[in-house]
Image (cartoon, rainbow, N blue to C red):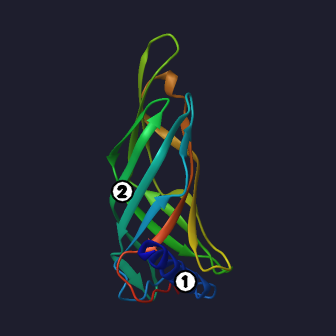
Amino acid sequence: MKYLKLLALSGAMMATMLSLAGNASATSVVSPVTGIKGESEEAVTLYGSTNVSCASSSFSMNIENSGPGVTASGKLTSLAFSECSGGDVTVQTRGSLEIHALGSGDGTVTWSNGRILVLHTTPFGINVECDYGSSGTHLGTIDTNVFGTATLDWNITALPVVEGNFLCGSSVEWIGSYILTPTVADTMSIV
């Protein structure tokens, strides 16, 4: 029950946060919010030369930059994948996120300087290591709904290979949906 109340409160805060974003020329996260956490709603999948599906994934970020004329941004303090099938996913470098306000009251997020390593074995028994990296990569869109909850639809269409052989392909597509909650807040808004 406590989790349900927290989720409802957090969702209402995200809805407020994003409803105020429509007319902003920059993105501000209003105190006392210090960060955002995301937990996957269901399996997260990396589609590429092989498909790796992880039953659970999470991230958290500290908001370091925010205010008039500044895009809200901060470093990822955690990024994790667990219970993966089809291969293993290891976070090499977490990187940072930027949150950009959209006119519709929602937001868009970009990911920079992050790297993930995908390890899998081909049907022929060949072990393959593929290192994929971000550089201002469009990560996804924050959507709010009438119930006041917010989700980040993580939809990287082309996370390019940084290291690996031809079996890695040129990129991987990362698809998932994360429920967002502020890390410290009674109220929060992005304007």
Label 1, residues with CA under 10 Å away: few <14, some 14-19, many ≥20: many
Rendering coords of residue 111 (x, y %): 46, 58
Q: What residue is rendered at 42% in x and 88% in y?
A: 30
Q: Secondary structure at mark 1?
A: helix
**Residue type highlighted by circle 2:** Gly
Q: Secondary structure at mark 2?
A: loop
Instruction: Name the outermost residue toward the top.
Output: 124
Query: Mark 2 or mark 1: which is in front?
Result: 1
Q: What residue is rendered at 46% in x and 68% in y?
A: 98
Rendering coords of residue 129 (x, y %): 40, 27
Residue position marked by numbered label 1 in the rendering: 12
Residue 137 lies, with reference to residue 65, above or below; the image says: above
Q: Residue 63, labelled with which disc?
A: none
Residue 92 placement: quadrant: top left
- Kindly report the distance in space between the C-alpha atoms of the residues bearing marks 2 and 1: 28 Å
**Residue type highlighted by circle 1:** Ala
Say whether disc 2 or disc 1 marks the residue closer to the N-terminus.
1
Of residue 5 and residue 112, the one placed in the foreground of this image is 5
Q: What residue is rendered at 54% in x and 57% in y?
A: 41
Label 2, residues with CA under 10 Å away: few <14, some 14-19, many ≥20: many
Residue 82 placement: quadrant: top left
Rendering coords of residue 29 (x, y %): 44, 83
Of residue 95 and residue 5, the one placed in the foreground of this image is 5
Of residue 130 and residue 16, the one placed in the foreground of this image is 16
- How many marks do you count on the picture? 2
Rendering coords of residue 116 (x, y %): 40, 42
93 with respect to 118 (left or right): left
Q: Residue 95, labelled with which disc?
A: 2
Residue 10 lies, with reference to residue 89, above or below; the image says: below
Residue 144 lies, with reference to residue 79, above or below; the image says: below
